[in-house]
Image (cartoon, rainbow, N blue to C red):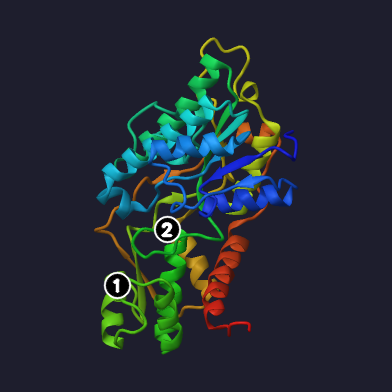
């Protein structure tokens, strides 16, 4: 257990992952936290990162910062996904080592696993066969990060732990119609379609003022808004989602992920992540998930029921499905003493309420 006075740097503390971990640490009484926005500290800049470590001297580092996105972004910006993530990891992990950081937690993703590996995916599935094409650059970067942690531990006796969360959703999620992950994208599309079907243009304009869609906001004409939303499969009568809806996915509430990550940070050391009888230490990372899955079509159905949309749900099968199944084996995590708490129905309800509260806050009068 870490002393509550230690200085903990949370890289990426404003994102979905980092903000949840920050809040969890606060709730546990860890108040000596350091977080810098991208504008304050560019983690791609090695000189700036070194200066930060020279000045702040954190005792513990949580590396939750990453360049992330959905299928379309992964396909279109392949170079960005591998270069930026490798650079962030190189800078933060390297300076952590050079500055004698006592413990480091590295956040990866279960997309590190091969597309046709056996299910559920255990830690030893890593590097057993080819990766899924759409997110290969991002996956390679994350594999490099976890292997960097593992290799520093083996060679230098450091205590760097890597956790690989499954598909996450929760407060501070990204609801961008092009670059978000599947669940927040489904929620926003179905919400906007419901507003259109009910003729609630105030709600539509409020939404796209908050999160403009390709330069279109609430000041544009009804026609312009309808045309732009239709491009993303959003109409008053139907919502069209990418793929066939048949891929199976596992979803983990972000605050559960944070609780698991902080639990590992506080209670697990590198020596606890592999069998002591092994001659070759590898795959010491830890899967973080629920061990439960459902289809994208089933997820969309749950969102429709939560939001109350009466229109049709359609599927654009010309668009990629991505990996057909991604279920994690969470035996190692369970054996270390942690289990998830929030099930998918409760999580969808919570996320939708959080989304609505964010929109409603825009209309609240300023306090004088």
Secondary structure beneath disc 2?
helix
Q: Are marks 1 and 2 in contact (CB under 8 Å)?
A: no
**In the figure, 131 relative to 317: above or below?**
above
Task: State the residue at coordinates (62%, 56%).
Answer: 343
Q: Residue furthest top?
A: 279
Query: Compared to 171, does 91 lie above or below?
Result: above
Q: Quadrant of the N terminus?
A: top right
Q: Is residue 197 left or right of residue 341?
A: left
**Local crowd size for mark 1, using a 10 Å CA cut-off: few (<14), some (14–19), many (≥20):** few
In the figure, residue 344 lies in which quadrant?
A: bottom right
**Nearer the observer, 32 or 215:** 32
Is 214 on the left-hand or right-hand side of 265?
A: left
In the figure, 126 relative to 222: above or below? above
Instruction: Classify mark 2: residues with Cα within 10 Å, few (<14), some (14-19) or many (20+).
Output: many
Residue 291 falls in image quadrant: top right
Residue 326: horizontal and vertical position, in percent?
A: 45, 43
Q: Position of residue 67 (x, y in %)?
A: 39, 47
Q: Going from the N terminus, do you reach mark 1 or mark 2 first?
A: 2
Residue found at the far bottom of this picture: 199
Considering depth in this image, is 294 or 60 the residue closer to the camera?
60
Count up the numbered dots: 2
Q: Which residue is the site of mark 2?
A: 182
The residue to which callout 1 is attached is: 215
Tell me residue 23's x, y (percent): 65, 53
Q: In the picture provided, is 320 more to the left or to the right than 280? A: left
């Amino acid at each position: 257990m870490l002393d509550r006075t230690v200085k903990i740097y949370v890289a990426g503390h404003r994102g979905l992952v980092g903000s949840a971990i920050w809040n969890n640490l606060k709730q546990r009484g860890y108040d000596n936290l350091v977080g810098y926005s991208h504008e304050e500290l560019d983690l791609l800049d090695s000189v700036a990162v070194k200066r930060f470590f020279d000045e702040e001297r954190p005792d513990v580092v949580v590396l939750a910062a990453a360049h992330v996105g959905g299928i379309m972004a992964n396909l279109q910006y392949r170079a960005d996904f591998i270069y930026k993530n490798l650079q962030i990891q190189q800078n933060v992990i390297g300076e952590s080592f050079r500055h004698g950081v006592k413990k480091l937690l590295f956040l990866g993703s279960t997309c590190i696993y091969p597309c046709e590996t056996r299910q559920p995916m255990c830690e030893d599935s890593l590097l057993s066969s080819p990766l899924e094409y759409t997110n290969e650059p991002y996956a390679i970067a994350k594999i490099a990060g976890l292997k960097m942690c593992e290799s520093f531990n083996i060679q230098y006796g450091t205590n760097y732990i890597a956790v690989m969360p499954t598909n996450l959703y929760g407060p501070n999620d990204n609801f961008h119609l092009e670059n978000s992950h599947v669940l927040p994208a489904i929620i926003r599309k179905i919400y906007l379609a419901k507003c259109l079907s009910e003729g609630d243009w105030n709600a539509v304009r409020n939404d796209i003022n908050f999160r403009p869609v390709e330069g279109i906001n609430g000041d544009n004409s009804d026609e312009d808004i309808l045309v732009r939303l239709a491009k993303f499969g959003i109409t008053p009568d139907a919502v069209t989602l990418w793929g066939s809806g048949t891929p199976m996915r596992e979803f983990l509430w972000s605050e559960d992920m944070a609780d698991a990550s902080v639990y590992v940070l506080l209670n697990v050391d590198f020596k606890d992540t592999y069998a002591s009888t092994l001659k070759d230490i590898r795959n010491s990372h830890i899967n973080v998930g629920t061990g439960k899955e459902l289809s994208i079509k089933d997820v969309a159905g749950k969102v429709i029921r939560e939001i109350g949309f009466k229109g049709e749900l359609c599927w654009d099968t010309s668009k990629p499905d991505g990996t057909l199944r991604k279920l994690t084996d969470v035996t190692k995590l369970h054996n270390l003493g942690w289990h998830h708490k929030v099930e998918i129905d409760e999580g969808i309800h919570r996320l939708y309420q959080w989304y609505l509260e964010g929109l409603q806050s825009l209309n609240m009068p300023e306090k004088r």
